[in-house]
Image (cartoon, rainbow, N blue to C red):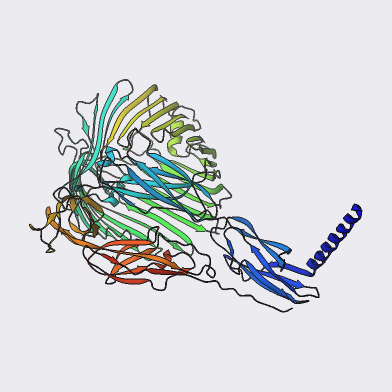
Amino acid sequence: MPNLIARKIFFIFLTIGTCFSSYAQQIAMEIKKDTITSKQNLMDLVATLVNTSDHPFNGFLNIKTPEGFQSISGEQIDIHLDSKEKKFIPVKILFRQIAQAGTSQIQIDLLNDKLKIIQTESIGQTIEENNNLRLSTSNPMLFISNSNDSLSVQVTVSNLGNRRQHTSIIFSIPELTGEKNFFEKKGTVAIQQDTVFNFKFLPPQSLLHQPQFTINIAGMRGTEKELFGNLAITVQNISSNKRFQDMEAARQSQYYQRNSLTGSYRKIGANNTVYQLIGSGDINLPAGYLSVSGNIYQSDNANEPIISNTYLDYHFENHQLKIGNINQPLEMALFGRGIEIGTADKSKSKKIQIGFIDQNFNLIEKNSFLKYGYGVYATGIIGATNPSGYTSASYIFKEDAMEQTLHHLIGIDKAYSLNNEWRGNLKIYGGMSHYKTVNKNEASFALETQYNGEISGVKLSGNYFLSTAYFPGSRRGMIQIQQNFVKNISKKHTVYSSIFMSDFSPESHTYTTNMESTNFRFDSGINFARLNSTAIKLGYQYQTESSNSFGWNTTKSSENLAMRAHRLVENFNWFSKNSKHSLNLALEEGFAKLPNTDGLKPQFKFSTAYSFKWMTANVSYQYGSFFLSEYISTSRNTEDSRTFQRLISSVSIDKRLMNNKIFISSGAGYINDFTTGQTPSGFINLRYLPTDKYQIYLNSSWYRYNMRNNNFSSFSSSNNMFIIEAGLTIKFKGQAPSSGKKGTLTAQVYYDKNANNIFDEYDEIAADYLITINNATFKTDSEGKLLYRSIPFGSYKLKPTVQKGWFTTGMEYTVDSYKSFVEIPLHQSGTASGKIQYEFDSKTVLDFESKTGGIVFNISQNGKFIQRISTNDEGKLIVFLPTGAYQISLVKSSLPPNTFCEETSRDFTIEPGKITPIQKFTIKVKEKTINIKRFGE
């Protein structure tokens, strides 16, 4: 009996299951994605439903979406299918920025009216990874009013991507003596969320003594510390007494250091000791500034110290006066001790400079004034700020005590630009020299032109110089031609050619000479495109050289020696993908016809350089003479000529330790050639920087040379030389100099209680009130005064401020005297307050974020922007303003998505000492729009 009952129950369930299975098979659903109409953040799905049964079907689609996705067609869509009917149901899925990266599944269930699931389908949507992070701060300027309070630095990391990210924020605090100045804060930022990093520290006295300093902040992501942003926060020390500081000039001055002093002790070998003092600095003066530079050294082997590169250089506006050591690298070079005066117009486009130089490099040498000759010069330029269109002229007079001559030289230099592709300049010199030994005058001239341009895809550049035999400049009796050609034969390959030719044959009536020297060189080749990490260059080189200047006696015609050579040149350059390794290999091989030899002689040169992180190694080997000087050093040493050979090798390291406080530089070298023999060498240099203000260094080097008996030296010698040097550098805190006039501005701040803008007996001084002039913020003293020192002449803006119900509307003041005084009246202000509210129907609106804090409003008066405010977390806003009529306007971009405000502006009036209510701003939410499209078969 029990078995019979069980069989009946099993038969009933089997019959019901078969019916349901048959029913499910008669209703079919297929989900497809419409890739044509899908947008960047919107999926267009089409659900195809077919009722193959003889009965109508009633049910609905249930749509399940993961976080970050939303069905804007609704979570449930009602379905009615008649017998044999087929329908297409559109389903729109919106995925927002909080959707996680990767593939997410959207599940659609088909249910009947009995809430039984008939069929389930899912479709995937892949979201590309977005790891965008943003580093920002709401307070780019911080103030220190109490030296005993800690300073709080806050930055915000915004995760604009679609995956959770781990971040590290590095705070760099300057000048923390004896401490680390990098601090790290770690945190995790959720998708589309903000995380605030707050770093607090107690500023040291070295920072409190500065008018302002900068905290640098860097944001890094992940364990690999990938940089995603950086910013700088300026911290001002608020006081009633400040010195002007040009922050832009101060930022530029970090790349060079003039306010420093270095003292050193140097031991050279066993018998020579040198003491040296080097320093430089800029001193701001009420009118202009003074630059000071000095270099003094004393040797045991000298009776008096030597002072070189030492001068005083005064700058006032566009004028300059320099006294001391002067070096003028003109066409006829002048250096020594003297005086120089320069001036320019306000645009610094037109400049004039004149000077006098006594040619003695030691500033304090006695009894030698004008002994070694002197010089006078004058230069002028028009268009100095235009490098492609200037014109300059110069005059130089020089008494050459060595050659016993008086030289006069005038020159003109003209730069030109034909178009964007062709530029160049032309120099013309004319000279007159009087030779005292023969009482004879010699006229001379020189021409030089340089150009670069492009024609038919060929880039051209050249330099041409010609001077007569008695030209007094540094390039006397010379013809020199240099021409370069470069052309891209494809986007990746480049061919090049260059020609160099020179002829040197100077003349002098004082020194009888018959020197002649000519050189010619032709190079041509191709630079191949870089293949992965390797670059290849192949070329051909032809060289000729002739000279009669290798004999000791140049007063008569010496033997003229000549050589010519043909060489192939190869260059290979490689670096690793991580840029830690690099290798450069250069080869030159060919044949040369040398003097007094039969046939062609082979020659070869090999050089390579390898570097890895902080290590560099170099090796070079040469076989054969590449120049006449090398040939002479071997052929004239003995009766038997030898082939010139040279081997050079070196290895060096540069390492930083202890957070860049210790620098180690060391290396060793070896040279073996015919002239110097085997010469080993080595060095070790150490630098220790305990702070930014001090630097201690210790340098040492050693080498051994072995001079052989050859044509240039009549004796052989060998010696070991050891040099050691120890020194201390002190960097003084300074500021960027200003060449203009500077004064002192005193301001009296007071509460103008009778509103007459005059400080009288009815008013009260405003102590501890914050006043901002340009970008400098002051806090008035107990007498309501502030003092701004060394402020350059010009106009300054007093920014509007509101504190404790009192305000200043701001003003502009011109400093045009060395002492200035201004009164700053404060007037009583009023308060305005308002709030926002949301208005929506939760059943019909789109998905949105009910954001209350951070809704931004602009305050304006008579169409002029005054300030920007935002709501707090409760949706309230409050603003303090001077009396008057204002307008407040909502910034629509600060509203959350899917919201809007119909009335975005309000007018209100501020009255002294009163709170003015502002009408509420109503924020509405957009409503859903559901469209169901029906299609027949």
Left or right: where 821 falls relative to 911: left
Give 710 or 579, whichever is nearer the viewer. Answer: 579
Residue 90 appears in view: yes
Q: Position of residue 841 (x, y in %)?
A: 50, 70
Q: Quadrant of residue 26?
A: bottom right
Residue at position x 20%, y 46% in the image: 398
Q: Position of residue 703 (x, y in %)?
A: 41, 26
Q: Is residue 171 above or below residue 727?
A: below
Left or right: where 726 falls relative to 47: left
Residue at position x 65%, y 64% in the image: 63
Q: Is residue 87 above or below residue 24?
A: below
Give 428 or 759, whichever is nearer the viewer. Answer: 759
| Residue furthest out toward the front | 1
Q: Quadrant of residue 886?
A: bottom left
Q: Position of residue 324 (x, y in %)?
A: 18, 41
Q: Is residue 47 above or below residue 532?
A: below
Q: Position of residue 539 (x, y in %)?
A: 53, 49
Q: Quadrant of residue 306?
A: top left
